[in-house]
Image: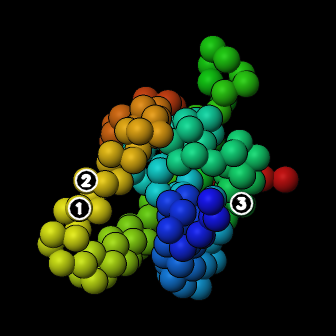
Amino acid sequence: MKLKLESFLPYRLNRAAAVASRQFSAIYRNEFSLTVPEWRTLATLGQFGAATAKEIGEHSAMHKTKVSRAVASLQRRRWLVRRTDDLDRRIEHLALSAAGEAAYRKLAPKMLAFEDALFDKLDPEELAALTKGLAALERALGADRAPTLTVQPDRAAAAGLDARPRRVA
């Protein structure tokens, strides 16, 4: 039996994801000067209000070092604030600052427009089949059981975060 990459599912998924990511990078890299981990962190905090670095990593399937670098970079840009947990000093609660919220409000519609443009290339039956097939694949791989965050608009306030940037060395 000979492996044919063009029909090997992991290869095809990776190729499709790489092409989509490269095309999407024109938005987040050129317009916002963000890396992949930075836009994922920004979008996660924009969607959920606040999270720990561990939660961001688990939700977006990023390694903790990538999340850590993204958090540091967003903080240097004053797009993110952090507060140490009162009970466990190893944990930091993260949220977007006012500037980070403004960046997220500009980026999110562009993300959705990019997705819509991809969807427009498929007919309704293809889109339905793709959505159903991806859900089935995620279930089969256990990716549907990934930790999820709960949308809590005032999660940042509950974590004791405000929009004042913390001083960065």
Q: Residue at x 29, y 62 (%)?
A: 130
Q: Nearer the viewer, mark 3 or mark 1?
A: 1
Q: Secondary structure at mark 3?
A: helix
Gap in angstroms between the C-alphas marked 3 and 2: 36 Å
Up/down of 145 relative to 8, above or below: above
Q: Earlier in the sequence, mark 3 or mark 1?
A: 3
User: What numbered label is drawn on residue 73?
Assistant: 3
| Residue 95 in view here | no
**Mark 2 sits on what residue?**
132
Q: Quadrant of residue 5?
A: bottom right
Gap in angstroms between the C-alphas marked 1 and 2: 5 Å
Query: Do callouts 1 and 2 mark residues in contact (Cβ within 8 Å)?
Result: yes
Residue type, label 1: Ala
Quarter of the rendering occupied by the N terminus: bottom right
Gap in angstroms between the C-alphas marked 3 and 1: 39 Å
Q: Earlier in the sequence, mark 3 or mark 2?
A: 3
Q: Residue at x 63, y 64 (%)?
A: 3
Query: Can you give x and y, in whole percent of width and height, for residue 72 in the image?
Result: 73, 53
Query: Do callouts 3 and 1 mark residues in contact (Cβ within 8 Å)?
Result: no
- 1 to the left or right of 144: right
* Closest to the observer, 17 or 90: 17
* Closest to the observer, 21 or 138: 138
**Mark 1 sits on what residue?**
129
Residue type, label 3: Ser
Crowd around label 1: few <14 · some 14–19 · many ≥20 (10 Å): few
Query: Which residue is farthest left?
Result: 124
